[in-house]
Amino acid sequence: MKELPHIRLIKTPLSYYFYDVNKNQLIEVTEELHDFLSSNDERKMNPKIEAAISKLKSDGYLSSQRPLSICHPVSVSLAHLLSHKLKHITLQLTQQCNFLCSYCTYAPHDFTTQRTHSAKRMSKETAYKALEFLFDRSEDSDMVIITFYGGEPLLEFELLMEVVANAKEMFEGRELYFSMTTNGSLLTLDVAEFFVNNNISIMVSLDGMPKTHDRARRFASSGLGTYESIMENLRIIKDAYPDYYSSRITFNIVVDQRFSTDKMHSYFSGNEMFEGNGVSVTMINDGETGYEVHSISDEYLISEKKHRFYALLNKYNRPNIVSRISKEALQSEIVRIEGSLIASDMLAQETPHSGPCVPGTKLLVDVDGSIFPCERVSETSQAFMIGTLDGGFDIKKCNDLLNICRLTEEECKDCWAIRNCKICAKLCDNNGYLCSELKKSKCGGVRFGVESDFRLHLSLRELKSRI
């Protein structure tokens, strides 16, 4: 049986295309050729179509080549990478938090697949071991990054200061960066002075205006909202250290898809407190919160589509009121999509999908000295506990995570979205083991997302040619 070309057909309101998986390009074609490729009906062949196909094939398009096997190319060098090229380590200074956010992965609730907040804290000995672990395995990395995480890491500010001092001494002569994720409630002038003097970047969680923020982010001790406390701290730091504030403080918004985002967009677009700061958006992750099944409201969808449309108009200098968040998100999305469509030759015979990160690119060390790929995975899952500070890495587990694509190898070989698959190993975690059925359940959503990316790219291309 003749193998079909490895392509995906796409139609927009203005034209017809196919995505060539081997060449990693979107090619515009006539409606007639598009119809033929869709049906693969030889009865529709005519000299015009035959000539077009012949030309495309001579240029390397319409190949039926699929990978023979699915394997990440870093597999063969993973042990060396983990021994010599570590560069980013996240230290979980504490599992305690002074907030009790309703959507928090670590908040106690009935549906959790994660640990919960606890009184556990990282000892000095464990922190120093983590630095030594990084130092011993980063000799080939010019740049080293140390991130502080919790719970709320500023509950362990003294330990944080000691780690910074020790790291600066240990990594002297190399590029060393520090960062931290914080809820912002414990930021003081003394803390800020230390951060300024040591060039530490921080990301503050802030969900928007008071009512929106306080709906979910409350003090654990009193149940009261936290907005005013955070904003007072930020104003003091902004007044005392304006350059540091604008260059080293970013904000993360957690969006609840049950509500309209109109006020959130206007809040961050028109507030002088965020003029020079990066602002990112995170969606509440179902299955890891105490919420009921987290439905997406019509208000949310309408709001986001409206702001997305305004951002698209703004890109082509059409006068409109555009949300800063939507504008920056759109630009970031365009850059990402264009970067994913770099022309190629053929798919390699041994090809992975693009989802998994390389273990060792970033690590989380928990309060007990156990090692995980990052802070997003479940610390209760044995599949993601890839080592300890005392015992080193479990290379087999690291390779299993790197090659998560092997769970669905035959399906991946024939998937047109293989180059752009974003399935993280975290999404395949079924109570401590990596599950092929769980992975396959995510494939439809991935392909929908990739095609949506392509449609955005094509829409912009078409608009540009007509404006």
Image (cartoon, grey):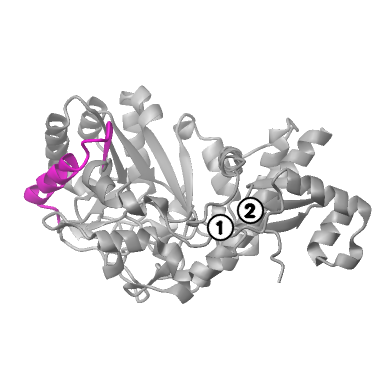
Which residue, given by chain and number where applicable, does mark 1 sit on? 418
Residue nearer the viewer, 251 or 421: 421
Q: Which mark is residue 21?
A: 2
Query: Residue flagged by tag 1: what amino acid is it?
Result: Ile
Q: Is residue 439 above or below residue 317?
A: below
Can residue 14 be seen by looking at this rendering? no
- Where disc 2 sits, the SS reads loop
Whole-number angstrom distance, CA of label 1 to CA of label 2 = 8 Å
Query: Residue flagged by tag 2: what amino acid is it?
Result: Val
Quadrant of image for the C terminus: top right
Task: State if disc 2 and disc 1 touch (CB < 8 Å).
Answer: yes
- Residue at screen point 40% across, 28% down: 246
What are the residue bounds of the magenta stretch? 121-146
- Where disc 1 sits, the SS reads helix
Count of marks, rendered view: 2
Judged left or right of residue 142, residue 231 is: right
Q: x, y (%) of residue 295?
A: 56, 69
Q: x, y (%) of residue 269?
A: 56, 37
- Residue at screen point 73% across, 30% down: 317
Q: Is residue 262 above or below residue 324?
A: below
Is residue 350 found inside the magenta-colored segment of the image? no
Residue nearer the viewer, 347 or 361: 347
Is residue 131 found inside the magenta-colored segment of the image? yes
Q: x, y (%) of residue 290?
A: 40, 70
